[in-house]
Image: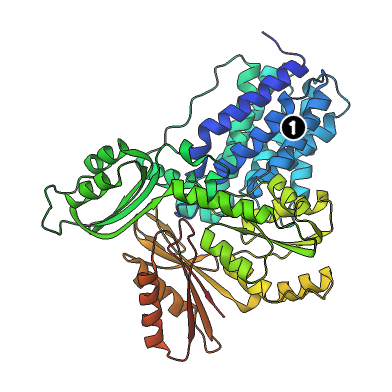
Amino acid sequence: MSVSNITSEKFNQMVQAASITLNNNAKFINSLNVFPVPDGDTGTNMSMSFASGAKYVNQDNSESVGDLSKSLAKGLLMGARGNSGVILSQIFRGFSKSVENKKELNADDIVSAFINSAKIAYGSVMKPTEGTILTVIKGVAQAGKDSNKKDLAELFDDLTNGADVALKSTPDLLDVLKQVGVVDSGGQGLFFVIKAFSDVLNNRKIEESHQPNSAEMSQMIYANHEQSDESAQGKLNPEDIKYGYCTQIMVRIGRGKQVKYNFDYDKFYEYLAKLGDSLLVINDDEIVKVHVHTEHPGKVLAWGQLFGDLANVKVDNMRLQQEDIIEKDEKKSEDNTPKDTAIISIVSGNGLGELFRSLGVTNIIKGGQTMNPSTKDIVDAINNSNAKKAIILPNNGNIFMAAEQATEVADIPTKIVHTKTLQQGLTSVLSFNPNASLDENIDAMEDMLDTVKSGEVTYAVRDTNINGVDIKKGHFMGIVDGDIKITGKHSVDTAVQMVQKMLDEDSEVITIIYGNDSNEKEANKVKSELEKIDSDLEIEVHEGDQPVYPFLVSVE
């Protein structure tokens, strides 16, 4: 049946279908993360961003598509998470501007709208890069120009094909994608949106989620993992937590007196999967690491011992942690003392939060890797800070655009210090002067960013090769200012070798922050090994509680 016009009712159906499709495929999109680190979150960001837009549309009773598209753009803006979510919001801001006075849309309206979407999206990025979501929206716009279809069902099939062709071209336009063998994750998300629109207009069933392979699954478990086991719970009632013990073990395969079985990944995994959720199992020939939320931590430990001895055990009662979070939040809410300047930092990990507060940060937004805060989260933090002006420390390049959006709609003057890492955030806040103006503080804090080198140790979730570095699944990686510099089987050794690459003749101070997947003993071992290299170095060790990264290191 031919479709000549999109009504408000049909537009709402298209938006809701796109939201469902992104949610169904978020894990697959996450798996396309270029770096093989367990924090790929593009799919999560796009899904949550679009869900916000879909909610705004569903709550708008207007019979005008122009009005609904405006609601979609507004909802996407306020819910935008990460750069992918922000660019998605700009795509539909361009769409909305083009159709704002239209009650219904015909084929010409749709083509014009997507041409404007591409224009606005490209204009929203300071240095547009081809091989990204921008290439895909440009492909959609070009397909619209090339199509002469007046039947909207047929037109959207052409648009979907244009998105697909552009998506498949992204590895040829961005070398790092070709190295890893993936298409752009943000572009993949946009393809799913356009295809969902087309499916609705063609009366096709919304596709089920893409079925990832086993290598993708390891990454996705952590990509959708909570900000941290405790911080993601927010205001959750402790009694509502289904699996109360966050249990982590490391097993040395084949060692120990209780070994009963040779290690078999599927057998090992399937038993643990019955004990809880948020399960992650990573192994190489020597060790297997386990993370699981369960009610029976003892069974997890006992199962591990049947395959080897336990080298590391960590069990946290998440219900007690949640009670502590609620108590702390209530205590903070009691402090309504007016302040001149709020310093708002985005942080994952309670230990890191306390460290930032000790240096003068007034407000913490929980998030970062694996869970970028939305524009609305940042706006709310600014407006509720009880301050006259505010400074934002994103501590993650993927949060810059959401933070920039927040400064434009916040109730008080707000500016950003462009901290790409938590280490830069900690360094920059030392330059804050309460007697200086907002601009003076921003300049001083920005000047500090080049004085610190940032190192991160995490583990690979798949085999790959990036810039000539061979990376094996389950091995650790040392990442210095965004570049993978070293890989190894053990986190401590990898951390030491990474720091060696960070040191130069001007290096004086090293700060080691250990996360959930490490401990103070391991951090002090890194410290002692570095002291052997240079006894004049000043080395500090702090507990960060951050997920995903056993060690964060700064060198100044």
Q: Residue 66, how many percent across, how many down?
A: 83, 26
Quarter of the image where the C terminus is located? bottom right
Q: Secondary structure at mark 1?
A: helix
> Badge 1: how crowded within 10 Å, few (<14), some, or many (20+)?
many
In the image, residue 291 sits, relative to residue 116, either above or below, namely: below
* Residue 439 visible from this viewpoint: yes
Which residue occupies 67% across, 20% down?
Answer: 13
Q: How many marks?
A: 1
In depth, the one of 340 and 419 nearer the eye is 340
Q: Residue 435, how many percent across, how many down?
A: 82, 76
Which residue occupies 62% across, 24% down?
Answer: 17
Tell me the amino acid under the disc marked 1. Answer: Leu
* Residue 115 visible from this viewpoint: no
* Outermost residue toward the right in this view: 101
Q: Residue 198, how many percent across, how many down?
A: 63, 22
Q: Which residue is mark 1?
A: 72
In the image, residue 417 sits, relative to residue 196, either above or below, namely: below
Quarter of the image where the N terminus is located? top right
Q: How is the image coloured?
A: rainbow
Q: Is residue 464 left or right of residue 342?
A: left
In depth, the one of 108 and 123 nearer the eye is 123
Q: Residue 497, how many percent across, how many down?
A: 39, 75
Q: Is residue 90 left or right of residue 347?
A: right
Q: Is residue 410 left or right of residue 163?
A: right
Which residue occupies 21% across, 48% down?
Answer: 302
* Outermost residue toward the bottom in this view: 536
In depth, the one of 245 and 526 nearer the eye is 245
In the image, residue 475 sits, relative to residue 218, either above or below, namely: below
